[in-house]
Amino acid sequence: MSSEESDSLICWSLRCSDKTEEVIEQVENSNKVILPESMLFKFKEKDFPLHFTITNKETEMSSVCGVFEFTSNPGKALIPYHLMQSLFIKEGTTCEFTIAYPVRGSYIKLRPHRTKFIECTDPKSILEHHLSKNYTVLTKGETISIKYLENYYYIDVMECEPADTIHITNSDINLDFDEPLDYVEPPPKEPSPPPSPPPIKNTVIPRSALPALHRDKPIKTMSDKFVPFSGSGHRLGSK
């Protein structure tokens, strides 16, 4: 089926194409598709970058995507494998591609699957660079993937404003992070023990500080040693 706003194309994964490994790697970590040149001519009067809603006719599931380039074979579209999985598209399935007009975005909240991502140096800058290059449109509920320093990170789109599907090209986007999926609350800290009282010091009063009445009396000292029979004597049996 073909109309002014849509066209039907047979979908294949990138691995079923003759594209270079570099192109496959970039498209797989995006939500962009490769379309035939005929789609470029058909929609050349539209505002660029172009966006399309892909609809699996068998399941009626759909998703909005951008375009990487217009170089696929006539009547065929090459799409990322993760998009095929989310829409239950099999190799060789015919899908409907309808021109889409997402609104300009102002806010997104993202949730990384792994805490390791937010531990990277400046994760917001990493995301901004990757999104501007590989994701021109975002939809609430989708999961995006990025590759950074040979690691793959999956990130859920939790919120979009002012609509559930937004385009982020040349937009000032406020970006927030939600807690990662694998985040674990640290155990509560045990209360610190109360401070120990200061040690009691034995203070020796100098003789000069004693009152005059007691100054001339010898000061008794207590012996630490046990003295046998040292108490006062009492006569046994006395009346």
Image: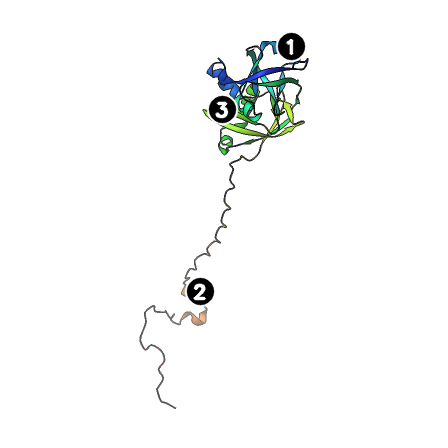
> Which color scheme did the rendering employ for the protein?
rainbow
Looking at the image, is mark 2 or mark 3 nearer the viewer? 3
Which is more toward the observer, 50 or 223?
A: 50
For mark 1, does the 10 Å Cα neighbourhood hold few (<14), some (14 to 19), or many (20 or more) residues? few
Q: Residue at x 49, y 24 (%)?
A: 147
**218 displayed left or right of 191:** left
Return the residue nearer the eye: 8 or 238: 8
**Mark 1 or 3, which is nearer the eye?**
1
> Across the whole image, how many numbered discs are drawn on residues?
3
Please state the horizontal and vertical placement of residue 217, each as a whole percent of the image.
40, 72
Q: Is residue 122 visible?
A: no
Residue with the mark numbered 3: 147
Marks 2 and 1, how far apart at CA: 110 Å
Picture coordinates of residue 35, whole percent (x, y):
58, 14
Near mark 2 (Cα within 10 A), the count class, few <14, some 14-19 or many ≥20, is few
Q: Earlier in the sequence, mark 2 or mark 3?
A: 3
* First in residue order: circle 1 vs circle 3: 1
Q: Is residue 153 visible?
A: yes
Mark 2 and mark 3 in contact? Answer it, CB < 8 Å. no
Amino acid found under the numbered disc labelled 2: Ala
Q: Secondary structure at mark 3?
A: strand
Q: CA distance from mark 2 to mark 3?
A: 82 Å
Q: Nearer the viewer, residue 53 or 232?
A: 53
SS at badge 2: helix
Q: Amino acid at mark 3?
A: Lys
Residue tagged by mark 2? 209
The residue closer to the viewer here, 200 or 154, is 154
Q: Residue 42, which numbered label? A: 1
Where disc 1 sits, the SS reads helix
Identity of the residue furthest to the bottom in this view:
239
Q: Position of residue 32 (x, y in %)?
A: 57, 19
Quadrant of the rendering where the C terminus is positioned: bottom left
